Image (spheres, rainbow, N blue to C red):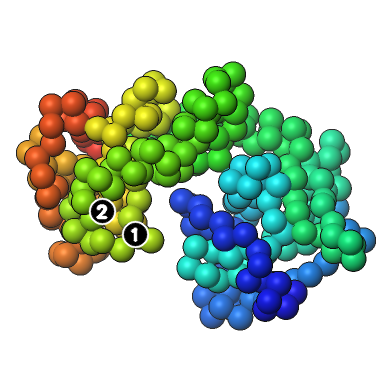
């Protein structure tokens, strides 16, 4: 695929690390990795009967998430949020394409090259079931679950289309929910004051899985945080008191720079936010 064609691909924003499924590859190899262009006939890898690996599961999570962000069809190649081109390699694609029942449909262009990957209902159902099992395990430890299964659940909820879209935007930290937090915190991280929009995340305080739809859309149930603080907050490794002082898990001691930890919210939480923070601290206490 040429550089020009890469530029024309959708710019996909995902909250999780979009190349987690390549984490076993050395960083220098990832930097050299070129976008591969392939036809349907080139997708030959078939299921082996062996259990799915952690890498395959990470690939499926990414595929479902990107597809949900692109009206149900993931581009075969796309730009990461930092502008780096990447693609869904044909090995993992073949694993799903040749499964029975089929878990992936391929969309091709006029030249026969694969340009889109559409998860089938069989894949979405399997993934949603697996995600629920994982959510049951992780919530017992007080941690969150992936974004993609929640989006699948939103679509299946039967809510009106406008509500579905608002909830999806909120789960992705976008839409009216993000804009409300941007206004509330002046477009800056609630702790550090960083104003680089690309690294700011609209983070829910009360766990998504435990919130009502109204709470999921409530801006008082959110904080605008820089990416690293959002990650720590989401995993209940930091929390905040009713006065806005940061609480830090003991296991983080000495592992992160002082400028990252030990801050406080730039304004004191209101009464409604304090109720959400109390629930977050309960989960924090179980993981700290």
Q: Residue at x 42, y 44 (%)?
A: 174
Side of 51 where 208 appears, left or right? left
Helix, strand or loop for disc 2: loop
The structure residue drawn at horizontal position 10% and vertical position 44%, both measured from the top left corner, is 267
Query: In front: 73, or 103?
Result: 73
Residue 56: x and y in percent read 66, 52
- Disc 2 or 1, which lies upstream in sequence? 2
Q: Is residue 164 left or right of residue 235?
A: right
Identify the residue at horizontal 20%, vertical 67% (top origin): 257
Is the C-beta separation of discs 2 and 1 under 8 Å?
Answer: yes
On the image, the x and y values in percent for residue 125 come to 69, 30
Image quarter hosting the N terminus = bottom right
Count all numbered tags in the image, as a single digit.
2
Q: Whole-percent x and y of residue 53?
A: 66, 51
Cα–Cα span, label 2 and label 1: 7 Å
SS label for mark 1: helix
Q: What's the mark number on residue 197?
A: 1
Residue identifier under label 2: 187
The image quarter in which residue 99 lies: top right
């Amino acid at each position: 695929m040429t550089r020009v064609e890469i530029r024309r691909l959708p710019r996909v924003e995902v909250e999780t690390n979009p190349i987690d499924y390549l984490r076993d590859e050395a960083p220098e190899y990832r930097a050299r990795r070129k976008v591969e262009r392939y036809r349907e006939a080139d997708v030959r890898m078939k299921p082996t009967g062996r259990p799915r690996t952690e890498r395959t599961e990470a690939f499926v999570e990414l595929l479902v998430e990107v597809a949900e962000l692109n009206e149900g069809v993931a581009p075969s190649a796309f730009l990461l949020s930092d502008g780096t081109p990447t693609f869904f390699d044909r090995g993992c694609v073949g694993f799903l394409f040749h499964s029975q029942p089929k878990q992936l449909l391929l969309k091709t262009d006029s030249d026969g090259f694969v340009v889109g990957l559409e998860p089938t209902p069989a894949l979405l159902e399997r993934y949603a079931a697996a995600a629920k099992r994982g959510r049951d395990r992780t919530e017992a430890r007080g941690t969150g679950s992936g974004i993609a299964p929640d989006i699948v659940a939103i679509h299946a909820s039967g809510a009106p289309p406008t509500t579905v879209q608002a909830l999806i935007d909120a789960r992705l930290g976008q839409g009216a929910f993000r804009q409300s937090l941007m206004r509330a915190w002046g477009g800056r991280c609630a702790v550090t004051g960083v104003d680089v929009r690309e690294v700011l995340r609209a983070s829910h305080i009360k766990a998504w899985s435990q919130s009502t739809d109204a709470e999921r859309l409530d801006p008082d149930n959110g904080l605008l945080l820089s990416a690293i603080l959002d990650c720590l907050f989401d995993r209940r490794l930091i929390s905040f008191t009713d006065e806005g002082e940061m609480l830090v898990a003991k296991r983080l001691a000495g592992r992160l720079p002082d400028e990252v930890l030990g801050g406080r919210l730039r304004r004191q939480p209101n009464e409604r936010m304090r109720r959400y923070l109390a629930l977050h601290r309960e989960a924090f206490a179980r993981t700290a």
